[in-house]
Image: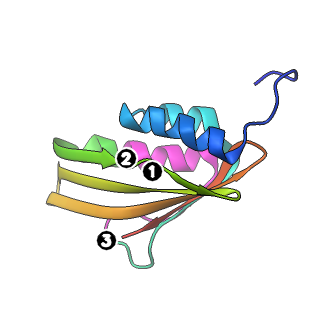
Amino acid sequence: MTANTTTLTTQEVAARFHELAQEEQWSAIQDEFFADNVKSIEPENSPYFSNAEGKALVRQKGDDFLQKIKAIHRLYTSEPIVTGNHFAVAREIDVTVLGSGRIQINQIMLYKVQNGKIVSEQFFY
């Protein structure tokens, strides 16, 4: 964004997020919307992922998972539900992962937006 542009609303961030998610462009979502101090929060005792903080570490977390995927069976992201400075989507992942075999994750992904940037993502599964 340049200095002449206005800050996107949560609704606008969610709409663009949805466009990119439908194309499985998760890196583009991170590049475009994640704040430098973004937090990625997993359920306690998650068998798949751990929490991460900071844009670079959150990116690395996702990249590490992508490198382990051997086969994709189904990926789905719902349209966002927006309220205040939060939006949520349902996400279904059915993949075969190196070292884990086939896993299915059905989750709610909750995002918090401040000043047009995503400052946290939290996963419920």
Give the numbered dot on residue 44: none
Q: Is residue 97 above or below residue 110?
A: above
Q: Secondary structure at mark 1?
A: helix
- At 19% from the left and 46% from the top, the residue drawn is 74
**Are discs 1 and 3 less than 8 Å apart at CB?**
no
Q: Is residue 16 above or below residue 107?
A: above
Between the C-alphas of marks 3 and 2, the distance is: 15 Å
**Residue 26 can be seen in this image:** no
Q: Mark 3 = which residue?
A: 47
* 97, 112: nearer the viewer: 112
**Looking at the image, is mark 3 or mark 2 earlier in the sequence?**
3
- At 37% from the left and 35% from the top, the residue drawn is 22
Q: Mark 1 = which residue?
A: 61
**Looking at the image, is mark 1 or mark 3 earlier in the sequence?**
3
Amino acid type at circle 1 is: Lys
- At 75% from the left and 25% from the top, the residue drawn is 1
Q: Secondary structure at mark 3?
A: loop
Give the numbered dot on residue 64: 2
Q: Secondary structure at mark 2?
A: helix
Amino acid type at circle 3 is: Pro
Between the C-alphas of marks 2 and 1, the distance is: 5 Å
Q: Position of residue 54 (x, y in %)?
A: 64, 51
**Are discs 2 and 1 less than 8 Å apart at CB?**
yes
> In the visual, does 2 lie left or right of 29?
right
Magenta stretch containing residue 106, yes or no? Answer: no
Residue 14 is drawn in which quadrant?
top right
